[in-house]
Image (spheres, grey):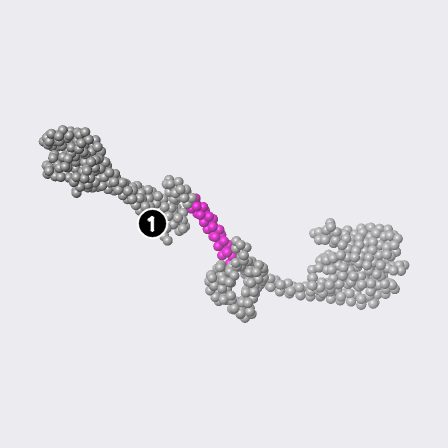
Amino acid sequence: MNKEKVSVKLSTLLILYLVGFAVILSAVLIIFFSYQIKNAENSMLIEFGKTTSIHFAGDCTEALITSDYGVLNTVINEYVKLVDIDSISVTDRENRVVASSDQTLLGKVYPAEDPVDLYTDIGNTLHLIQPIKQENRVLGYLYFNLSKERMRASTRSVVRSWILFSLVIILIMVSIASIVVRWITSFSRDILQVTRKISRGDYSGKAKTGGFSEVEAIASAINTMEQDIEEREKALARTNAMLKSIMNSPSEISIWSVDRDYCYTFFNQTHKQAMKKVWGVDIELGKCILDYVHDKYDAKSYRGYVKKRYDDVLSGRNFNLVEKHLYPDGTPLYTASYSSPIYNEKKEIIGLTIFASDITKRKLAEEKIEQSLKEKEILLKEIHHRVKNNLQVVSSLLNLQLGQVQSSEDREAFTESINRINSIAMIHERLYSTQDLARIDIDAYLKDLFASIHTTFELGKPVKLVAHVGPVYLQIDQAVPLGLICNEVFTNSFKYAFTNTENPVIEVTMDKGDDGFYTLKIRDNGSGIGKPVDLEKNETLGIVLIEALANQLAGTSTITGEKEGTIFSLRFPVVRSI
């Protein structure tokens, strides 16, 4: 129902109620006053008969006794002039008119029904009868006559006056009602116009105040509501603009949401364009997304896969995955998708939202980098392999030359050189034979280095290696100097320490300290050197080489001797100082 029509009907009803009330009130007043007038005239007539007629009757007594009717007529005419009455008649004991202000009534006989103190209605005339007595003897009767037509005319005149009065009252009340209704409905129309503007988003109108307290309160409440709605709508518009900008600005991010029936409730332009490019469809809000996807050459049973994935989210689980699609021309499309359920105010899942980022450029770059890394890895392994082979060639040449060397000192020098070359070659061998091309597992390397040196010395008894090396991995620029240092220390132990030792043992420990330094200790249980060695003043090739390599590692080294055994210590930072 139209609100304006309701207002008009209410106004009309109010006017009708007021007019009806005025009509009813006027009718009641007319009936009441008509009754009162009639009674008043009768009462007046009766009262006149009880007062004036008594004195008049006294005046008529002597005239009746003397039968002087002329005097009686004179008295009657004088009384008729004094009162508003049709006529006055005097009858004798037989109720015959002997004197009257109306000469036509002379001789008329009124009905003799003992008309003593009676108010009678005879024909078209009302009569007030007053007996004329002398010493309780009735001499005649005095009639005061009033015609009914005159009574009716008088009543009609009064009624007309009251009808006119009632109409004036009705007109006044209608006018007042109209003014009041207009006053009241003006606020209603004003409020109606304001609310209509609000419904259209126009907040320029304001409801007028100053009416009834209730209406004024309603108008004030509407103005406050309008201001609040306007502020909230502005905030909502800003939020919507921001959300729209966020959702549509990144061209690489597709955003869409569906309800529990898999029908679209939202999608941005990026998703619409992607669906057109991948599936060749124009999507619409309210349509089921499963109707747009189908099995293709690059996605077998893809529709069932999408449905299962959405069902998982609608049951409360999220998914985060990377997918690969192919455009019709075979161009790859990689997307990283994240989905989460949508909850209503009752914490019920009513749908899901999906954010899908186009990561094709990144994936292609990663694949390119990965391919490049594989190629470089192969190349680096080939380099390490060739370096190792070249070092093996040098070692083989030295071995060939060693066969022609007769001097024991020269043979020893050749052997030490061969071991040094092998220690470096073993590092390159490990680098190309393992997955990690940048770091060396020091524990495994030291064990292999020890085994290689052990084969070059014939002691007639085995030397046991006890290694306590933690998970230490060094890059090649630290592994090569460390390997050469260990080669020199192992060689010295094999050469000098175990001549008189029954069960020779070399113990190696290496770990990383909390201070960011590695500590390497090599201890043997041989004869010992008897006193500490001053590495800076010692000029033997092995010691000079150890000192130089320790400096290359930015570390410090010491060699201490005991009665049984020798201890070599090396301390260097985890990352070499530049």
Residue 253 visible? no
What residue would you read off at disc 1?
9
- On the image, the x and y values in percent for residue 161 come to 22, 40
Q: Quadrant of residue 478?
A: bottom right
Query: Can you say whether 71 is above or below 496 in the image?
Result: above
Judging depth in this view, the residue of 353 and 527 nearest the camera is: 353
The quarter of the picture where residue 94 lies is top left
- Identified at 30% across, 41% down, the residue is 176
Residue 506 placed where, x, y %?
A: 83, 58
Outermost residue toward the bottom in this view: 297
* Magenta-drawn segment: 223-251
Q: Secondary structure at mark 1?
A: helix
463 lies left or right of 387: right
Q: Residue at x 18, y 34 (%)?
A: 131
- The amino acid type, in three-letter code, at marker 1 is Lys
Q: Residue at x 64, y 63 (%)?
A: 373
Residue 58 is left or right of residue 221, and the answer is left
Name the one closer to the observer, 304 or 390. 304
Whether residue 120 is situated above or below residue 493 in the rendered picture: above
- Where residue 144 appears, as percent x and y from the top left, is 17, 36
For residue 480, above or below residue 403: above
